[in-house]
């Protein structure tokens, strides 16, 4: 009776979209990081000297159900003592103990948390109990016992926990005892070599002489690379280039994939990724499991001028549930024209590159950014040959004998933490 729609479509111009990709995200980390030029492909972070080893995590190895302290990591507890034979002998003397959630753990001996989570509790000014901190795997307590002092706190297991304990009666080798008794260099509260300053004096007081010592081995960040070779057949770009350029669409989606990989590496790379470059003093654990306002407060108070949280969308949802339970409704904060959840005025930006483990545990990152703030900065180099975007180049590699044109797509990047308190992580976030 009339022309069919199937036949009519042969004469019609189809309305079409550009190729879509489910992989593309907002990539908030790439948007909030200030990007610094790294000429020569490297970026050196100079800091003041820190003469003493910090109280970092003490790693443990596991064979079956048995744990052993890694000998070299005991130097973190023993003020930098580095005699391998002595450390190995001490590591062999640790005894493994198991505690159930809620059990009191003796704090009168050097102990390392091999698995689980414990809380340290002290006494407030009016005799009330206060939470000092929460320790996870690699955390340690009881180091006062090595100097013959009693701890001024108690320890309780928050989860089923495995603790490696060095018996208090263990005799210390003479070299180690002498090292621990030695007077330590004067340092400030951040562990940096102290700058001697006189104040409040009167008259002709002799003033101290001083200088600012620098770290002799500053860290250098090398630019990392993400690359791929984009291949397109010349027949495709010759015959099917209207109304959209095939080469441009292929390149656009390839660049999106490179940028997604770039953000993933900035979070997870073992060398420069944010999750792997957190100072132990800035890595804390949730008190109960789900992320609560108290946990984010604890994360905030460890640095000045926190400018953003980064969290997996599931962690943001978990935090929202905790706020609802407490009948809290934090106001939204606008970032680049988009409203985001916030806490204490700091936006909580979604980042699906932060991993969620199989046990539904993830982390929340807090950071201060910018060189002027001694924060976290992104590194790149612009002015590359055949640069397509800042720090990203597209170089034509030629056409092979099968008429396939190839393009080398490259981006160089890294990230640097200028001072330790610029970056913090809340671990053990249950979602």
Image (tube, rainbow, N blue to C red):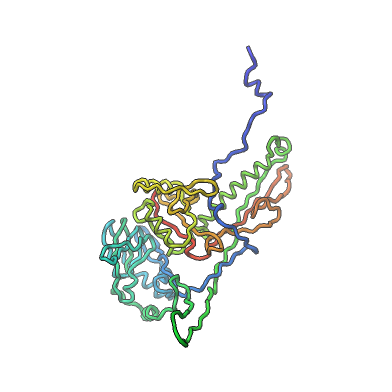
Towards the viewer: 70 or 131: 131
Vertically, is 427 above or below 94? above
Count of marks placed on residues = 0
Towards the viewer: 180 or 347: 347
Q: Position of residue 198 (x, y in %)?
A: 46, 80
Towards the viewer: 9 or 404: 9
Q: Is residue 379 left or right of residue 270?
A: right
Q: Position of residue 42 (x, y in %)?
A: 61, 64
Q: Residue at x 46, y 86 (%)?
A: 203
Q: Position of residue 79 (x, y in %)?
A: 41, 74
Q: Residue at x 31, y 57 (%)?
A: 158
Q: Is residue 140 left or right of residue 276?
A: left
Q: Is residue 121 left or right of residue 277?
A: left
Towards the viewer: 318 or 196: 196
**Image quarter of the N terminus:** top right
Q: Residue at x 60, y 60 (%)?
A: 36
In which quadrant of the rendered view does residue 43 lie?
A: bottom right
The furthest residue to the front: 203
Q: Position of residue 297 (x, y in %)?
A: 40, 57
In which quadrant of the rendered view does residue 371 lie?
A: bottom right
The furthest residue to the top: 1
């Amino acid at each position: 009776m009339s022309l069919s729609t199937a036949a009519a479509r042969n004469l019609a111009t189809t309305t079409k979209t550009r190729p879509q990709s489910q992989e593309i995200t907002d990539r908030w980390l790439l948007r909030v990081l200030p990007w610094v030029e790294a000429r020569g492909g490297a970026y050196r972070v100079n800091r003041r000297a820190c003469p003493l080893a910090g109280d970092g995590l003490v790693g443990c190895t596991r064979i079956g159900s048995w744990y052993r302290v890694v000998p070299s990591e005991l130097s973190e507890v023993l003020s930098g003592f580095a005699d391998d034979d002595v450390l190995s002998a001490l590591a062999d003397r640790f005894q493994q103990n198991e505690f159930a959630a809620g059990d009191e753990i003796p704090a009168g001996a050097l102990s390392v948390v091999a698995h689980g989570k414990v809380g340290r509790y002290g006494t407030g000014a009016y005799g009330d109990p206060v939470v000092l901190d929460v320790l996870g795997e690699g955390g340690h307590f009881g180091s006062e016992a090595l100097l013959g002092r009693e701890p001024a706190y108690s320890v309780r297991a928050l989860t089923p926990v495995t603790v490696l304990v060095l018996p208090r009666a263990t005799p210390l080798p003479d070299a180690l005892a002498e090292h621990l008794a030695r007077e330590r260099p004067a340092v400030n509260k951040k562990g940096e070599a102290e700058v001697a300053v006189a104040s409040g004096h009167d008259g002709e007081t002799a003033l101290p002489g001083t200088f600012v010592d620098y770290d002799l081995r500053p860290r250098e960040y090398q630019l990392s690379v993400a690359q791929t070779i984009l291949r397109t057949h010349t027949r495709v770009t010759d015959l099917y280039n209207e109304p959209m350029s095939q080469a441009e669409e292929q390149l656009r989606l390839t660049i999106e994939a490179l940028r997604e990989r770039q953000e993933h590496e900035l979070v997870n790379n073992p060398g420069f990724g944010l999750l792997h470059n957190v100072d132990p003093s800035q890595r804390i654990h949730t008190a109960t499991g789900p992320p609560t306002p108290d946990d984010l407060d604890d994360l905030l108070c460890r640095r000045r001028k926190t400018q953003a949280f980064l969290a997996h969308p599931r962690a943001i949802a978990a935090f929202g549930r905790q706020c609802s339970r407490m009948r809290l409704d934090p106001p939204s904060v606008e970032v680049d024209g988009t409203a985001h959840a916030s806490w204490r005025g700091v936006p909580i930006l979604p980042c699906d590159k932060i991993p969620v483990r199989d046990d539904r545990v993830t982390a929340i990152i807090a950071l201060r950014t910018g060189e002027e703030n001694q924060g976290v900065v992104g590194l790149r180099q612009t002015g590359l040959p055949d640069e397509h975007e800042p720090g990203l180049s597209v170089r034509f590699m030629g056409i092979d004998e099968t008429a396939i044109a190839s393009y080398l797509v490259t981006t160089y990047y890294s990230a640097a933490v200028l001072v330790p308190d610029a970056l913090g992580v809340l671990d053990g976030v249950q979602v």
